[in-house]
Image (cartoon, rainbow, N blue to C red):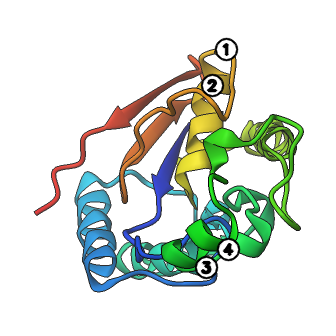
Amino acid sequence: MKIFFVRHGKDDENYRGGWSSLGLVSEGVEEAKQLGIYLKEKNAKFDIRKIVSSDLHRAKETADILAKELKLMVTTDARLREADNGELAGMRNEEALKKYPGLFWSTLKEDECYPKGESPNQFFVRIKTWFETFLIECKDSEENVLVVTHGGVINVVYHLVKNMEWSNMKKPVPVSNCSVHVLDTVRMEIYEEKAELQ
């Protein structure tokens, strides 16, 4: 069984992400449609009971587009959310730079929280706990599982699978919009699948 991790489609880069409730821009909608076509043609045989998505709008919107193309059901899991950036969620970049100058994910100490948000360490522990639990839940499945989430979440998964030390201050693994990252649960190997999107 393989787990296909997909990052959501493109959202508005003029706003801070994190727990933003903003959805996809038109380009992101098209990316998700093309990815749905690619996965359908690939015939990956996804388990209809295990299509899991972050409940944040940009991820759920991506998952719904994929589900429509693949004729699958979507369930949401709030544990798959991106890092909780608290008061900065959905804030315009210019406003964030004025209100919180110099405050970025990479400038936080590991135990330092965003204003009314979570710390990098809390985020890492949340994703690690979800991942370990999810692997146990899926261990008897013979069909592939599709997980739609965020770049930060996929980064943590890479570090866990490859047994690499994780830090918010390190350069992250590149995870582009609507990219596919496949985890082989037998070999415990993860790799990016280069989807040929039109």
Location of mark 1 (residue) = 163
CA gap between label 1 and label 3 equals 32 Å
Dot 4 or dot 1: first in sequence order is: 4
Q: Amino acid at mark 2?
A: His
Location of mark 4 (residue) = 89
Label 4 sits on a secondary structure element that is: loop
Q: Quadrant of residue 148?
A: bottom right
| Count of numbered marks | 4
Callout 2 touching callout 4 (CB < 8 Å): no
CA gap between label 1 and label 2 equals 6 Å
In this view of the protein, can residue 143 be seen by the observer? no
Q: Position of residue 55 (x, y in %)?
A: 69, 74
| Foreground tag (2 vs 3) | 3
Location of mark 2 (residue) = 159
Label 3 sits on a secondary structure element that is: loop
Callout 1 touching callout 3 (CB < 8 Å): no
CA gap between label 4 and label 3 equals 4 Å
Q: Amino acid at mark 3?
A: Gly
